[in-house]
Structures are given as structure tokens and as C-alpha cells.
Amino acid sequence: MIDLILSIGNYRAHRGSIRFKGIDYHSDGLHGLRHPVTIKYDPGNTSKIYIHDSTGKYICTANRVNLQPIRPMTGGCRCL
């Protein structure tokens, strides 16, 4: 059994994504949500969070968005 921590706050989804503790998460279940949500999460696993409505009803699981590393430019910059 996983011990989840409840994060009570005024979290809002935008275009299927939500930012929590500086990390972006995505789920198709977040599309169209117009009301604030509550988040439950496992502090030892930041790969996903669990989204609930204000009554505590489960809505969906949102997965961490993996950002591609930025590759350094090679060859310098051409100025115009």
C-alpha cells in the first residue's frame, strides 16, 4: 500500500496539464476541467499525481511531463 500525501490547494488544470511543486504533469482527464482540484501524491515518486475534485472524488492520474534536454548549438551563431 502506498501512503499518499494530500495537498490541499487551489490547483487548476490548463490544456490537460497542471503544475505541481514546479513540475508539469499531463492527463487527458484534465481537459475541460473548470474547477479547482486537489492533488494526492507519493513524495517518493514524482512520476505521477492523483487528481481529485473538491469532494474527494478521484478524477484521473496525471503523469510527469518529460522534457527533452536542450542540445547546445554547434558552429556558433550567424548574426544578420
Image: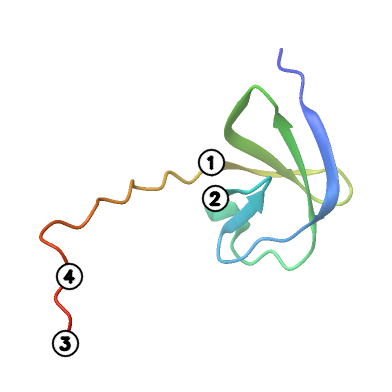
Q: Residues within 10 Å of mark 4 (few under 14, many from 20)?
A: few
Spatial separation of the CA atoms under disc 4 and disc 2: 38 Å
66 sits left or right of 25 in the view: left
Indicate which label's residue lies in the foreground, 4 or 2.
4
Q: Residue at x 59, y 53 (%)?
A: 29
| Residue at the spot of label 4 | 77
Spatial separation of the CA atoms under disc 3 and disc 4: 10 Å
Indicate which label's residue lies in the foreground, 1 or 3.
3
Disc with the residue nearer the chain's start (4 vs 2): 2
Location of residue 75 by image quarter? bottom left
Residue 53 position, x and y percent, is 80, 51
Spatial separation of the CA atoms under disc 1 and disc 2: 7 Å
| Residue at the spot of label 1 | 63
Closer to the camera, 47 or 37? 47
Query: Which three-letter amino acid code belongs to the residue tagged 3?
Result: Leu
| Residue at the spot of label 3 | 80
Query: Which three-letter amino acid code belongs to the residue tagged 2?
Result: Ser
Give yes or no for contact between labels 2 and 3 (Cβ–Cβ under 8 Å).
Answer: no
Extreme-top residue of the structure: 1
Give yes or no for contact between labels 1 and 3 (Cβ–Cβ under 8 Å).
Answer: no
Spatial separation of the CA atoms under disc 1 and disc 3: 42 Å
Query: Which three-letter amino acid code belongs to the residue tagged 4?
Result: Cys
Spatial separation of the CA atoms under disc 2 and disc 3: 42 Å
Q: Residues within 10 Å of mark 2 (few under 14, many from 20)?
A: many
Q: Residue at x 59, y 62 (%)?
A: 31
Closer to the camera, 47 or 50? 47
Give yes or no for contact between labels 1 and 4 (Cβ–Cβ under 8 Å).
Answer: no
Disc with the residue nearer the chain's start (1 vs 3): 1
Location of residue 47 by image quarter? top right
| Residue at the spot of label 2 | 27
